[in-house]
Image (cartoon, rainbow, N blue to C red):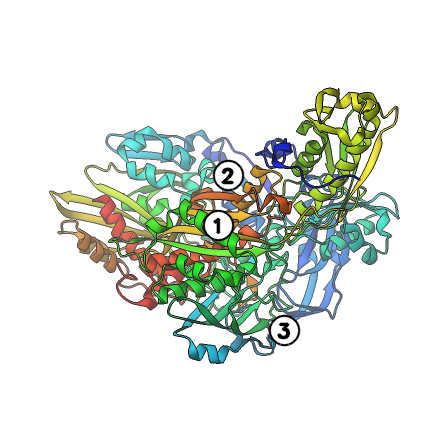
Amino acid sequence: MAEYKWPEADKRALIGKRISRIDGPDKVSGRAKYSYDIKRPGVLYARMLRSPHAHAKIVSIDITAAEKMPGVKAVRIIQEVGKEIKWAGDDIVGVAAIDEAAAEDAVRAIKVQYEILPHLVIDTDPQNAGDNAKPTAAVTQGDPAANFAAADVVSTEGFYGNHVITHCCLEAHGMTTEWSDDKNLLVHPSTQNVSGTAAQMATPLETPATNIRVHQDHIGGGFGSKFGPDSWGIECARISKQAGGKPVKLFLERAAELMVAGARPSSYAQVKVGAKKDGTLVAWDSVSWGTGGPGGGGSPPLPYVFNIPHQHKQHTAIANNIGPARAWRAPNHPQGCLITMSALEDMAAHLQMNALDFFLKNIDLTGPRAQVYRDELKIAADLIGWQKHWHQRGDKTAGPIKRGLGLSIHTWGGAGHASDCDITIQPDGSVELKMGTQDLGVGTRTALAIVVADTLGLPLTGVRILIGDNSYPVSGPSGGSTTIGGISASSRRGAVDARDLIFAKAAPALEAKPEELEAWGGMVRVKTDPSRSLTWAQACAKLGGMPITVRGKNPGPEKLNDQGVGGVQMADVSVDVETGIVKINKIVAVQDCGLIIDLKTAESQVYGALIMGVTYALYEEKIMDQQTGTMLNPNMEFYKLAGLGDIGELVVHMMTGKGYDERGPIGLGEPPTVSPGAVISNAVANAIGVRVPTLPLTPDQVLAALEKKGGNHARI
Amino acid sequence: MRAFEYTSPENVDQALHLLGNTWEDAAPLAGGTDLLALMKDDIVSPRRLVNIKEIGALRGLSIDAKRGLRIGALVTIQELADNPKVAHAYPVIAKTANEIAGPQIRNMATIGGNLCQRPRCWYYRSGHGLLARDEKGQSLVPGGDNRYHAILGNTGPAFFVSPSTLAPLFIALRAVVRLVGPRGPREIPLEKFYLIPKTESEREHDLKPNEIVTEVIIPLLGGARAATYEVRHKEAMEWPLALASVVLNMKGKTVSSARVLLGHVAPVPWRSAEAEAALVGNQISEAVARAAGEAAVANAKSLGRNGYKIQVARVAVKRAILAAA
């Protein structure tokens, strides 16, 4: 019986080491081809006529002039007359032409008349949202009324929130499609879901999914917004068919990418917290609201992580005309985290308690991972110098620059998804793995190479990894931090089975039983007598003339991964109280994720999450204009992303060893993105002595908070 | 982007022949960091681009002991920032230039282009015209999101802010801009080059469609003290929320004359006579700098979302004065 469990630390040659991405050189040199880079012979370029109105009905469409324009190969009405359009930027007509300029000229020649309908694009005031506000039923736990009444301290002034942000993928959404004949479609998408794309295209295209081939080598960002082909992907294939099957490239222009390809729901809450004098939390009350576009928006988990015994909460989803919401790393968690951690830190300040002591006082409310949080809080506090630098709210030092510390904790699941792979071993000893997965930032190729090479006792270069094609075994979509758990488990099981087949073939030559063998250092050898050995190639030669292929699966025998992680972050910021500018001095992230396959890519995930976190904490906002119903900053000039000069010093500490390794790999894409907004907001409050209620913490918001607080901070 | 004719003259005469009488006819192309973006967004669509980068006479940078600094229109911002003579004689110019945007922009963008770049108003850039009007002719700015709009000179109809970071400093340094058109060269103080448009057919500077900027002349600093202070949200690739450029002439410890210019606060680089008056005759101290900052924004007015910029501008003036002194 094969034994799949992860090797003990002394038997890991590669797992858990700090290993550079195997496809890193291709990416930094530009050799890596993203789907956006694919240029098929004779490709046509597609452009969309998009609705300029946030809410309108189509009265008429005239495409005759566009169809006659030089270079135009297909014009396709996507939304017919009479259709109600619910956000600016929605597709109305698609055009394919021999180059982008011809396609754009044709789009300009299309005439569409609209009946303009009333729109709502703001979300900050549910009172003004009318019928668009959809209250959900209140949820009560325990007896909040009695416990608020009995609490020593009740803070009632808490208002917190974050505006809508977009995914802003550097590689825009889109694909190139072509019909190889009238039955078979080839798709080069930018997707988080290689194996699942064909099934989503089959029905609308009336083509069997088996006839749809999907290939993607690299993806340039998804963050939860690229699970499906999207309406425009389906239209791309239809336009391609209309153009005689020719390849058609349809990737969103930057403005469309920011307008229509995904929004993270906003979330605002009025919060009341009740505590005892010693800091023990007893009661929570929140009235929250937010939007995720026409469908309303997700309800943030409140109170986040801390299960305060007595709770009352009510959420209102506001449906509006900003374009649909999509999952954004750890859906709803960053919002819930900001609201909760801000309210708790405000309570600590109210009690004049050190925020770290306050969090520790209540840490058992976090449930089964309380001890992990305790350990992580201690490490984070040491790394940021909490005891040395923390002060009561409001930096009292002279001058306009005020410094402060903040903290936050977060959680996530991260169980592995279903995953299959095929591992082939050739008689010459070469090894290949095929899996219909993708690398969304996980370092998928590298992780697979590490697991297989470690299992077979080979160097990293001894394994060839092929991913990104739906002709390979099915593996799940990359979302919700499910990839590393899934792909590591299936590749481990497959590699163990493949290795055991080689052991069975090699055993007679070594005069041993197969179970007495081990693969280590490029050798197959007897565990108790390593001098009895074959090189890997000699062992594989025993296969005879034919290779073997083994299927690895997850789920499968033995539990190889787990779920449920906790992380702690602390931030050190400086705020110029005369200009309202916030600067990050340092952020410390302490994170567990079970057994780490590659320490370097794991740390990189956290660095990336912190950078993205600084960005949404300080800069990002989908700014909508209620007059025109359109987005004012669908560009990378005023849709601001942090640069290297803005992120400060980032310190990452991964929890490893006993208590962590034996859980197996757990996903890491989501958890470290949850806390940065909260931790930076808390640090700013600690620095300037007043809460800036909403993210991003822009100069206008910081100065407004200071002015509201009064005193002479707001004026020089 | 719409189709256009591309021409590449070798001298100024050829360039002038290729330019037209309207902006729709032709536009001069230098670094292209603004023009190409405007064309891609379909905000302008000249039928012809006149690439002036091959014109040697528009290049070069020199310092003359009498006339001061001559900067050819095609000098890039990075060339200006890196020039050791400029760093020696005008450290404030080198420092200010080196803070603009990021290396990619500084390596492409030219001085002529920096002075002539178009406003970043998001209503303008999304097709509502320079004066940001809706179909009824009403400005979208006062009732809209005006967080980055003007706080001075904002009685309308123009509410955008002048985008150049160098123009306020150059005006504070009494720069002169030289242009050439069909009737030959002309020379005007840079301060007079910027205009607040009253109608959609006017532009925010006094450059005619058939003219090009050839060079900028900046008198010697003499003993004057100068500094720019810029308040930016991000470190790089970012527009200032407000900036101030200050040039102080001193008699002993007392300010004998001052020029205080604000940027990103008004439709033109904004000269503050009030701040200058608050400085003249005084020794520079925290209190005097603060008073000048107050004076600079005494007439500033919030449009609703941009009131914070009054504070930011006030601080920029104070800090520029303290940095200069």
Q: Which amino acid does label 2 sit on?
A: His
Crowding near the residue tagged with mark 2, few <14, some 14–19, many ≥20 C-alpha atoms within 10 Å: few
What is the three-letter code of the residue carrying label 3? Leu
Quadrant in the picture for the C terminus of chain B: top left
Q: Nearer the viewer, residue A326 or B113?
A: A326
In three-dimensional space, the C-alpha distance between marks 1 and 2, rounded to whole angstroms, equals 71 Å
Measured as percent of width and height from the top left, residue B23 is found at 51, 49
Circle number at residue A117? 3
Chain ID of residue with mark 1? A
Which of the two marks, 1 or 2, is nearer to us in this view? Answer: 1
Residue under numbered circle 2: B17
CA separation in Å, label 3 and label 1: 53 Å
Residue A135 screen position, x and y as percent: 59, 76
Mark 1 crowd level (few <14, some 14–19, many ≥20, 10 Å Cα): many
A109 over A311 or under it: above or below: above
Q: Are marks 2 and 3 in contact (CB under 8 Å)?
A: no
Check the residue under mark 2 and report the chain it is in.
B
Q: Is mark 2 on a helix, strand or loop?
A: helix
Q: Is mark 3 on a helix, strand or loop?
A: loop
> Going 74% across and 56% down the picture, which residue do you hit?
A65
How much space separates mark 2 and mark 3, taking CA atoms? 50 Å
Q: Residue A376 bears which disc, if any?
A: 1
Q: Residues within 10 Å of mark 3 (few under 14, many from 20)?
A: few
Residue A698 horizontal side relative to residue A517, left or right = left
Q: Can residue A559 be seen in this view?
A: yes
Count of all numbered marks drawn on residues in the image: 3
Nearer to us in this view, A206 or A666: A666
